[in-house]
Image: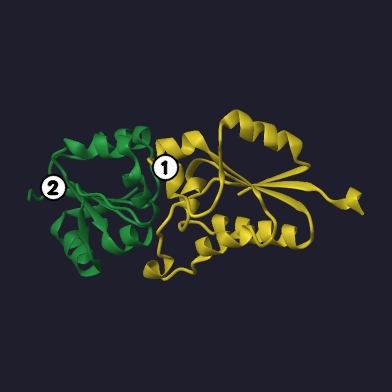
Amino acid sequence: MSNSVKQIAIVNQQSSFNTPNGREALDLALIFAAFDQSVCAIFIDDGVYQLYQGQQAELIKTKDYLATMKAFDLYDIDKILVCEQSLQRRGINACELTINANVATSAQIRAQLERCDHVLSL
Amino acid sequence: MTTTAQLHLLSQTTTEEQLSARLTLVGKDDGIVFMQDSCYSLKSPAVVALLAYQTFKLYALADDMQARNIDAPSVELIDYPQFVQLSLDYQKTISW
């Protein structure tokens, strides 16, 4: 049975609300986790905006999927990598993130991608 | 306001390099409105620095800024009726 467990990396690279990508990436991550796959969530480029604290999606009549990120813990998704350089360029501090994530260098993210069986990028 | 002043609408995230390229097309009497996910860009110190000494007016849709928890003192927050009024005040709008 353990042979059927795959390591799946889901890479978020789009900002929160202009495209549905962020929400779909989250759905994917939770579905894979629900089927006992090993999921790693990675946030790079504009994807880091999805983790910025204090956002209120209801003000722009959008479903607040960002709050659902807190369910990562519940689904045993504990490998969460956020690109350090992407945060820095956008003026976001690691302490301003909504969830407990590992701030990682590009080299560390690259290494994680190598370890995964499948990589899905949204 | 001159009759040829344009209102530029930004709706996507932008880096300081991209914005710098865009600003070459913005006249000194023009206005820029940050809306949708472009509001996130105002969190970047490099973007704020780039906008600091410009002569054109900077606006942002208040709801879009608040929804993303972005605060930018150098930008005038506007609501939807003000946005409509602005689009009438300028010669035309240009969506990038």
Q: Color of chain B here?
A: green
Quarter of the image containing the N terminus of chain A?
bottom right
Q: Color of chain A here?
A: yellow
Residue most extreme to the left: B1
Bin the neighbour count of mark 2 within 10 Å (Cα to Cα): few under 14, some 14-19, many 20 and up.
Answer: few
Q: Image point 62% across, 35% down: which residue?
A: A109
Disc assigned to residue B4: 2
Q: Is residue A106 visible?
A: yes
What colouring method underlies this structural image?
Answer: by chain
Q: Please name whichever residue, A60 or B88, is drawn nearer the observer in this view of the structure.
A: A60
Amino acid type assigned to the residue bearing label 1 in the image: Asn
Q: Please name whichever residue, A65 or A84, is drawn nearer the observer in this view of the structure.
A: A84
Asked if residue B50 lies left or right of residue B4, the reply is right
Amino acid type assigned to the residue bearing label 2 in the image: Thr
In this rendering, the answer to whether A84 lies above or below A22 is above
Q: Position of residue B16 (x, y in %)?
A: 34, 35
Discs 1, 2: same chain: no
Disc assigned to residue A93: 1
Figure quadrant of residue B36: bottom left
Q: Is residue B25 visible?
A: no
